[in-house]
C-alpha cells in the first residue's frame, strides 16, 4: 500500500485573464490564473503548447528562460511576450509561505 502525506486540499475563487496576440511569425493565446497560493505568483498557461509556469514580473527579466518555458522559437518574440506579461503580472516581495 502506498503512503503519502496530504499537503492541502483547498478551493479558491480565482481571477483568470485570457489574452492573445499575434506576432509576424506566430499567434499566442495565454491564460493567467491569479491566486493567493504559490507565493502570490500567478499561473501563466500557454494555450497552444499547454506549458505553464508560476511567474511574477521579476521573472520576466530572463527572456531566455521564458523562451524555453513556452517553446518560443525566436528570442525577439520572447522579449515581446515579456513586455506584454510585465503589464499583467505583479511585482512580488519575497515572503515565507511554508
Image: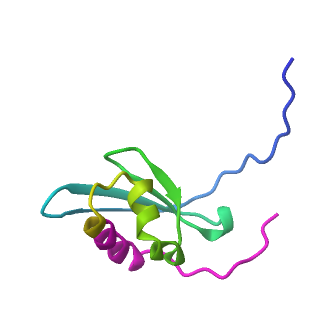
Q: Position of residue 74 (x, y in %)?
A: 26, 60
* Horizontal and vertical percent position of residue 68: 42, 55
Along the viewing direction, whichever of 84 and 75 lies nearer the viewer: 75
Query: Residue 23, located in which quarter of the rendered image?
Result: bottom left
**Residue 58 left/right relative to 10:** left
Identify which residue is drawn at 47% across, 52% down: 52
Residue drawn at the location 79% of the way across and 72% of the way down: 96
Residue 86 drawn in magenta:
yes
Which residues fall within the magenta stretch?
78-98
**71 or 85, nearer to the observer:** 71
**36 or 79, nearer to the observer:** 79
Residue 95 visible to an observer of this rendering: yes
At a point 77% along the width and 48% down the height, the residue shown is 8
Q: Is residue 37 magenta?
A: no
Residue at 74 percent across and 76 percent down: it is 95
Q: Locate residue 20, reporting x and y percent.
A: 26, 61
Toward the left, the furthest residue is 24
Does 22 sit left or right of 29 as displayed?
Answer: left
Image mark count: 0
Q: In this orientation, does residue 37 appear?
A: no
The image position of residue 98, as x and y in percent, is 82, 63
Q: In which quadrant will I find the N terminus?
A: top right
Amino acid at each position: 500500500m502506498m503512503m503519502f502525506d496530504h499537503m492541502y486540499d483547498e478551493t479558491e475563487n480565482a481571477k483568470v485573464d485570457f489574452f492573445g496576440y499575434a506576432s509576424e511569425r506566430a499567434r499566442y493565446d495565454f491564460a493567467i490564473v491569479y491566486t493567493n497560493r504559490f507565493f502570490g505568483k500567478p499561473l501563466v498557461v500557454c494555450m497552444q503548447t499547454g506549458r505553464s509556469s508560476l511567474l511574477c514580473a521579476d521573472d520576466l527579466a530572463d527572456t531566455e528562460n521564458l523562451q524555453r518555458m513556452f517553446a518560443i522559437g525566436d528570442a525577439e518574440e520572447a522579449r515581446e511576450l515579456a513586455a506584454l506579461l510585465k503589464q499583467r503580472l505583479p511585482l512580488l516581495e519575497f515572503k515565507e509561505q511554508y
